[in-house]
Image: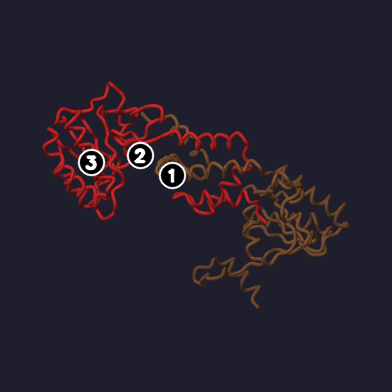
Chain colours: A brown, B red
Amino acid sequence: MIPEEIKKFIDCFSKLPILGPRQATRLAFYLLKEDKSKLKGLHDALAGLSHLSVCEQCFFIKEDGSALCRVCSDPKRNPKVIAIVEKETDLMTFERINKFNGHYFVLGKLAEKGILEPLQKSRLAALKERIRKKLGGKVEEIVIALSATAIGDFTSDLIRETFKDLSKKITRLGRGIPTGGEIEFADEITLLHSFEKRS
Amino acid sequence: MIPEEIKKFIDCFSKLPILGPRQATRLAFYLLKEDKSKLKGLHDALAGLSHLSVCEQCFFIKEDGSALCRVCSDPKRNPKVIAIVEKETDLMTFERINKFNGHYFVLGKLAEKGILEPLQKSRLAALKERIRKKLGGKVEEIVIALSATAIGDFTSDLIRETFKDLSKKITRLGRGIPTGGEIEFADEITLLHSFEKRS
């Protein structure tokens, strides 16, 4: 009794990682109630994504027309300071602090097991190659901006070991009580780190 | 530093009622990682929605090509038994019980204040008109399938009053302990209803 178009929509949208069938259904009826310009907007937004690909230098997203992403092709940024992040969204959050003027390197989502995937290994190999051949064999700093989790710790150690001869400095984001965080609710490890890093 | 296409996507999708900016961002990067056929599928699913409009008889969704929705145009269904639902999704849930062979009437989402909106008033007027002119002045049954909330109760009373001369029977969905529901956790009103309706 339900129009095919609705079924298709629900089927298609409920397969996305963030929506279940209920939400996809609600979305369908919401869109049907909105005026067609909203539908058109979403439509164009989806179409826009197909004009993007991966920057071959840092593995962030770039426009199809350009060889590199906007960070990598910005002459005002320092290619010899490289922040290694896990996900594209981490890069975007990092950009918001407006403090970092180097390049990025997107490693890709870390697996639960803590073992690097083939794709991640080849990305790291490409970075090594790039430092050796295009950045004079040694960069100024590698900032490890991975999550403060066990897997992040494990991977950080691995990166430190891998790049120890390719960077003057290898740092990692500091740990401590987050802004607005209350001591009462801080876990012991965070508290220990913040105590050690007291200033 | 972020490609325009991503910004547009996030902007557009985070305005939907079910997604925030974070989820829209995650969705963008998820889609960028999937193969293009998935993007195409979503694209077509969105385009499909623009071929739908509202059934002028019951106010459910219908395909643009046909005059009425699938329920209203099904000759095997009884137009003299009408279930009044609030939302299109309620109709869809109701259809799943495979027990109801009448028509529907979508009233539209009830406002918190319990006052009918102009659109809802005009829909009810259209139903009255239809019963008078096309259904012989009186239908067999109106099933009020509104939520068991205070606004649902209020609106049900209003519908009973409005249609008292236009239907032989006006019923409302029974209340009680839901299947799988434990007595211990039932609220008092549900328990009272289920006690009164014991059989």
Q: Of tags 1 and 2, which is closer to the observer?
A: 1
Q: As shown in the figure, which amino acid type bears the numbered disc 1?
A: Asp
Circle on res. B124:
3
The picture quadrant where one finds residue B125 is top left
The image position of residue B71, as x and y in percent, is 31, 28
Q: Are marks 3 and 2 in contact (CB under 8 Å)?
A: no
Q: Of tags 3 and 2, which is closer to the observer?
A: 3
- Residue receiving disc 2: B89
Q: Say which residue appears at 70% left-offset and 45% top-offset.
A: A54
Q: Is residue B160 left or right of residue A1?
A: left
Chain of the residue displaying label 1: A
With respect to residue B65, does B27 lie above or below? below
Badge 3 or badge 2: first in the primary sequence: 2
- Residue receiving disc 1: A35
Q: Is residue A49 left or right of residue B49?
A: right
Element under disc 1: loop
